[in-house]
Image (cartoon, grey):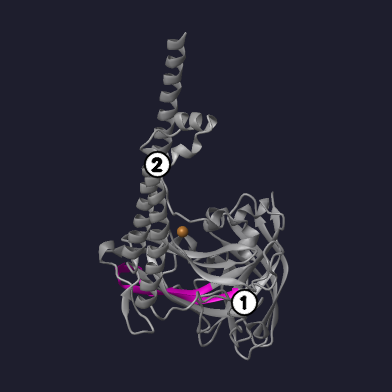
Amino acid sequence: MKGNIMNRARKWLAIGFATVVASSVFYVPTVAAHGEKSQAAFLRMRTIHWYDLKWSKDQIAVNETYTMSGKFRVFEDWPEAVRHPHVSFLNVGQPGPVSTRMSSYINDVFVPRSVGIELGGDYSFSVELKGRRPGTWHVHTMMNIEGGGPLIGPGKYITITGNIEDFENPITDLTGNTVDIERLGLGTVVGWHVFWYVLGIAWMWWWARRPMFLPRYMRVEAGEANDLITDTDKKVTLGVMVGVLVIVLYGYQSAESKHPVTVPLQAGLLGEIEPLPVDYDRMVSVDVLKANYRVPGRTISMKLEITNHTDGVISIGEFATGGIRFLNPDVVVDDTDYPDNLLAPEGLEVSQQDIAPGETVVVEVSGTDAAWEVERMADVIYDPDSRFGGLLFFVDAEGNRLPIPVGGALIPIFV
Ligand SMILES: [Cu+2]
């Protein structure tokens, strides 16, 4: 009977093992996204739009730095499910400190803490990162919103070469000392923890070397509790008590004399940051007459009424949403080495490309690419709010890009 059960267990184990092996053989991971794909599509389309992104390098050595920079637009039609971004933190999405953040700026304001950003505002940002752990890492721009969670921007693969042992993070403090914060204070932390831990163990050993439970219990029951603690025990206890106090005092004094100047943790909201002064929305107005996407499918199509308020001809060059960029190849060619999986170099079709100054036209615009499905924008069908948002880029004669927000109801087409 027992043998029978064991045999059946073995059989099922073998089947399970074979299934795992077979599925991992056939599973070929292509492009790894990291978290953002599983987020609700309507949230990704209607929160932060990252654009004009640049990565200064995608190959660095340990200790070498690179800069991730660009702009972002805080979408006006912000979803209710995310609290307004009055407390936001400019972050970097990477698997731990494979590179360390040396500095980060929003509109030239140094932002080591949380800041407020305004709905409808355009901002520039830059983050300098220093290579630490060798490997190829997918690094994302990212904004954390209090009461909303992580809003993950586009990610790009960055390769770091070298040896992590060589990594250094030197900082010169305000007392003039240069220290390597990669290793600063490590010996002190380990030393003190080991010391107190050993003292605790020694205390327990002092008592535990004699029989601990039953004999003591019985003597306490017999009314002989006082005999359990000897005179030597009392001396040791007093010695430990005084010793601990003296050592704490000594530790405090020596830390004070070694670091006479210390400040508390610097914290607190840095306040609202003013958006960039450009007001793109005045230059072009766009009304979404209707917007659809095909289910299943890879296309989002829009019928837009566009008015050009500038005094030059503008051309529809790009539609960007959820990190995906659909380009009209006649107008925009990407020279920033934008991540392949998010770039549709010929993905945008327009019924009319150029719009004369002062002219109001109705244009059909459609973006098509596998990214619409791969990035699970098509999963907006599962969302409780079938509305989209994105940036439509117009390009003027000088090549300036005007990002204009578009958004509204996004209706699925099934047949
Ligand atoms: Cu990623």
Res. 369 visible in picture = yes
Give the residue furthest to the bottom.
Answer: 311
* Label 1 residue SS: loop
210 magenta-colored: no
Do the CB atoms of the residues marked 1 and 2 lie less than 8 Å apart?
A: no
Label 1 or label 2, whichever lies nearer to me, is 2
Few, some or many C-alpha atoms within 10 Å of disc 1 (few <14, some 14-19, many ≥20)? some
Judging depth in this view, the residue of 50 and 12 nearest the camera is 12
Q: Is residue 61 magenta?
A: yes
Of the pair 150 and 235, the residue shown nearer to us? 235
Residue beneath the point at 40% across and 41% down: 207
Where does the image place residue 288, in percent across and percent down from the top left?
A: 71, 70
Taking the image as drawn, is residue 332 in sight?
no
Under circle 2, the secondary element is helix
Q: Is residue 275 above or below residue 243?
A: below
Marks 1 and 2, Cα distance to the nearest angstrom? Answer: 58 Å
Residue 293 placement, left or right of 322 = right
Q: Is mark 2 within 8 Å of ligand 1?
A: no
Residue carrying label 1: 116
The outermost residue toward the top is: 1
The span picked out in magenta is 51-73
Q: Position of residue 273 (x, y in %)?
A: 60, 82
Residue type, numbered disc 2 = Trp
Report the amino acid beneath label 1.
Gly
Q: Disc 2 marks which residue?
A: 207
| Relative height, residue 6 to residue 357 (above, below) | above
Where's residue 133, x and y in %? 33, 62
Instruction: From the top left corner, tell me how far across and down residue 211 is, in percent.
Output: 40, 33
- Seen at 41% across and 54% down, the residue is 238
- Mark 1 / mark 2, whichever is N-terminal: 1
Horizontally, residue 71 falls left or right of residue 336, namely right
At horizontal 71% and vertical 58% (from top left) the residue drawn is 386
